[in-house]
Image (spheres, rainbow, N blue to C red):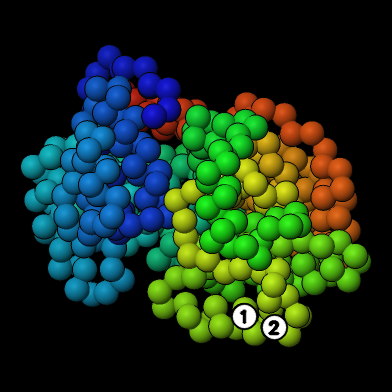
Amino acid sequence: MSAAVTRAVRSLTVVQLIPAMHSGGAERSALEIGRALVAAGHRSVVISAGGRLTERLQAEGSEHVTLDIGRKSLGTLGRIGALRRALKAIDPDIVHARSRMPAWMGRWAIRGLARKPHFVTTVHGLNSPGRYSAVMLRGERVIAVSQTVRAYVLGHYRWLEPSRVRVIPRGIDPDAFPYGHRPDDAWQKAFFAQFPQLAGAPLLTLPARGTRLKGHHDAIELVADLRDRGVGTRLLLLGVLEPGREAYAEELRELIRQRGLQSQVVLSPPRDDVRDIYAVSALILQLSNKPEAFGRTVVEALSLCRPVLGYAHGGVGELLAELYPAGRVPLGDREKLVERAAELLRVAPPIPMLQSYRLADMQQATLALYEELVAQPTD
């Protein structure tokens, strides 16, 4: 657990609204803020359709109300009354929405309450601008997870007052990604026994779900280009194998066959030992061809003292510019990508110990925002 958040003078009740508690950045943030609220003596409630993280949420002291408020369908609107009744029973000081449909549901439900809570939103992604997405800018405070997100929403929604937008970057626990960590011999032996084709050359790891936006094709081409320059590498596409994404995985396998890289590239499902995988990797790749809102894997890798190579746009470019400029390359520039990869594999610039983007910083800033709001009257 991250460093405890200082206990506030007044106990708060905070409800977070999210579609489900399966996996993902928004879900992880809801879990982390719930933990911080409990540690500070507050009451933490999450309303969602449930999911695998619910058990952990409750074990850490938060409450969970199961209600499907995230499905994009007319049927979801029929649950506004149920959400209003749940909020009336909880009587929250803060309602914090982390996704668009829950934000709409929350706004409508709050209108029917005698004691109206303060409404907060977090913009976790670069959503397509429009009326549906605009609900995420209707909070009394709008949390942006990066400067990239702040610039994006202010650029697309000119009516949004800049003073309502607060940048609170997501953070990682340095204890979970300790500087200079190396996995023990038993783990390494088991890992390379499972994936023997990854042994014998520098390992490149691209951690990303199985979608075309994440740059898997570019990573495969990078390995081929490095080979053509006489630089042997291996590539792990970590997390690319997912249910429902089988056609995409086969598309990647076909490209691997075309490039003659069957003995150098491995596709895997998501794993729980990402820290150890990063630690044995020579280079972590972040090659999304669509701008990311943040880029958590960049911070995780650098916290471990592992070099990162990524495209200089969006949240990833923002993080690399601040934390590891040597790892930036122009979006889609294949020649620059292979040149920089070869340079980093030869001699990577030193990586200082992480002094920012820590989980405790994010937790403290979010709780401070809650406390700032409750010191003011609701509209």
Q: Secondary structure at mark 2?
A: helix
Q: Which residue is mark 2?
A: 257
Q: Secondary structure at mark 1?
A: helix
| Quadrant housing the C terminus | top left
Q: Position of residue 70 (x, y in %)?
A: 29, 63
Horizontally, is 11 left or right of 366 in the view?
Answer: left
Horizontally, is 178 left or right of 318 in the view?
Answer: left
Residue 253: which disc?
Answer: 1
Where is residue 212, by image quadrant? bottom right
- For label 2, the crowd category at 10 Å Cα-Cα, with few meaning under 14, some 14 to 19 and many 20 or more, is few
Residue under the point 70% across and 68% down? 264
* Residue type beneath disc 2: Arg
Residue under the point 61% across and 68% down? 266
Closer to us: 156 or 170? 170
Horizontally, is 61 left or right of 319 in the view?
Answer: left
Residue under the point 53% across and 44% down? 186
Closer to us: 27 or 181? 181
Q: CA distance from mark 1 to mark 2?
A: 6 Å
Closer to us: 178 or 210? 178
Above/below status of 46 relative to 242: above
| Pointer 1 with pointer 2, Cβ within 8 A | yes
* Residue type beneath disc 1: Arg
| Quadrant housing the N terminus | top left
